[in-house]
Amino acid sequence: MLKTNGKKLGIGIGIFVVIIIAGVLISRLIGGASQKGDVIYGAVGGGKENFLADEEVNRILLEEYNLVVKNDAWSNGKLIKDPLTYELDGQTKNYDFVFFSDQRYYEYYQLPAAEGEAPRLAKKKGAIALNTPIVFYSWDVVVDAFIREKIVTEDNGTYYVTDMPKLLEYINEGKKWSDIGLDSIYGNINIASTDPVTSSPGATYYGLLASIMNGGEITQDSLLQTMPKLSNFYIKSGFMNNTPADLFDLYLRTGVGAKPMIVDYEKSVIDFANANPEGYAQVKDSMRILYPSPTIWNSHCIISFSDAGSRFVDALNDKRIQEIAFNRYGFRTGVTGGQYDVSAIGVEGIPQNILSVVSGLKMDVYNEIIDGLKATRE
């Protein structure tokens, strides 16, 4: 009898355990289903792919905002010309948001569509979400020479190009590196950049140059006087890369002899230092980050077209997401670039705040600059 009861007891315990396990599995399945979130689709300009793919960012979006964000890569030019639609299960649908990589496209999209452009989708929310300033990357020996020339000054470990007109004058006059004591560097003084005709970063840089050459904010009228100087600078710049990632990589790989000085974004070195700490350790003592005075912001701006897309716009203000954006990828958040503890990122020479900044140019002024530069090739 005892054996029979023992067997029944064992069977009962076994059934009880099975029920508990089944309950846990069902709970996980139900929980997993609830964690799928609302899937939204965005048309996204370049330069922020790593940030948007960040595992922790996407976990926060799912757990706190019930969002799963899918991003399709677009060029800024197509974002303002083509219909902002995608295909899913045989259906054409409107995107939930568009994420420009340049503020002038963001502002232009909010104007009525011009002839040949697709109708605009109705805006629900918009924001200037991610910012990074234009900087120069150079090397210790070059910066030391510019300090002697009173072109660069150092302040609390950060280097500023405080006499931009003098630097541009050296370039336009065809001064050689040897003229400022750098006999080991061949050729004329130059700042390598991406091509403004084909590259948004290059166009932003030339917008900054136009403002500096003009001595202030550029308008269509003042551009008439500035354009010849800008075109001459463009001609003297020679061969240009089409993407900033390629240019920054060449700067790091080929060093001071081949790339004494380049123009890029501040975010590039922060992203590089986090993605490749060993590589950064090899160059950090000799590389220098130079902040033009003034500089100009490159701003990534977002517009939502659906309620779920608006939740994503709101989520970009989440303090945790903003900290990841800066600490890992170098994006300063908010309209003014935010306030940060820059010592936390482990990259030397990054200032706490960006103070000397010129306003970005409107689309029509940029278009005139690009057309003028194109004409120099003909």
Image (cartoon, rainbow, N blue to C red):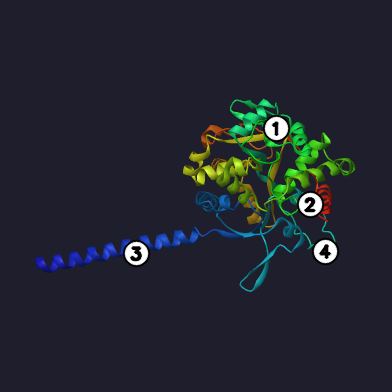
Q: Nearer the viewer, residue 302 or 24?
A: 302
Give me the C-alpha separation between circle 3 and circle 2: 56 Å
Identify which amino acid the numbered label 3 is placed on.
Ala
- Crowdedness of circle 3 by 10 Å Cα count: few (<14), some, many (20+)? few
- Crowdedness of circle 4 by 10 Å Cα count: few (<14), some, many (20+)? few
Give me the C-alpha separation between circle 1 and circle 3: 80 Å
The answer to whether residue 144 is visible is yes
Which label sits in the foreground, 4 or 3? 4
Residue contact between numbered discs 2 and 4, judged by CB atoms under 8 Å: no
Q: Secondary structure at mark 2?
A: helix
Mark drawn on residue 319: none
Mark drawn on residue 108: 2
Mark 1 highlights which residue? 179
Residue shown at the point (53%, 53%) measured from the top left: 62
Mark 3 highlights which residue? 22
- Crowdedness of circle 1 by 10 Å Cα count: few (<14), some, many (20+)? few
Residue shown at the point (58%, 48%) measured from the top left: 249
Q: Nearer the viewer, residue 24 or 110?
A: 110
Q: Nearer the viewer, residue 98 or 37?
A: 98
